[in-house]
Image: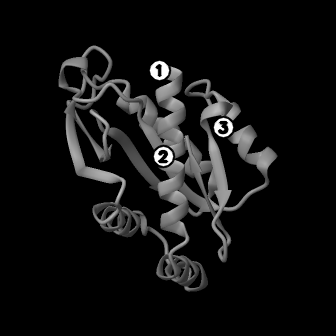
Amino acid sequence: MKMKMLKEDLEFLTTLAQEFFKQEDIVYKLNQFLDNQIKGWEIWLQVEFALFLFKHPNVSEIEREKRYELDKRMSKDKDICSIDFLIRQKYKQSSIPLEIKQHENASNCIRYMLKDIEKYEKVRDSSTTTGRSLWCLGLHPTVEDDYLEKLINENKFREINPDFVTSQVIEGTKFSFTLL
């Protein structure tokens, strides 16, 4: 059951990301960021993605910056964390937690994505409203597939099942998105 849900969530989130990154205005802005060497536009990306989700026909509800209590036995330094998005797919009972990362370096982007997954695992069970796994959507410069695979597989945080990872080039840009 869990594997089926993971597969369905990956397919749903991949479709959302593909549709989002096909928008002409998004492609244009991504290229402008690169051409003008603008950094630190992760919040812009989150806001644009939120606006996209609000009007998407297959999304029934989204929450932004959902706060959760951390299990004090697992997290000594912080009490609370925020998840960027909770996305409820139409006709589904629970929401999919999603973190978004952007970095001008693919290695750093993947590392921050994996750290977010680790952070989510410290959320107290009693404070979660969803039984779904956290997904991370990262936007980074396009790199070779084998290099990306190496970054994911050789991370120090956890083992990642390659069946639940996708990375795709954003057409018309030098960027890719990775979902894990």
Total marks shown come to: 3
Q: Quadrant of the C terminus?
A: top right
The residue beneath circle 1 is 2
Q: The disc labelled 3 sits on which kind of residue?
A: Ile
* Residue 26 left/right relative to 150: left
> Which circle, 2 or 3, is nearer the viewer?
2
Question: Which quadrant would residue 80 be assigned to in this image?
Answer: top left
Q: Report whether 151 appears left or right of 51.
A: right
Q: Position of residue 130 (x, y in %)?
A: 28, 29
Marks 1 and 3 sit apart, C-alpha to C-alpha, by: 22 Å
Residue 70 image label: none
Task: Indicate whether 151 appears above or below 160.
Answer: below
Q: Amino acid at mark 1?
A: Lys
Residue 38 sits above or below residue 105 on the image: below
Nearer the viewer's eye, disc 1 or disc 3?
A: 1
Residue 34 location (% of width, % of height): 59, 78
Q: At which x and y percent is residue 13?
A: 48, 48
Q: Which residue is mark 2?
A: 12
Residue at image mark 3: 152
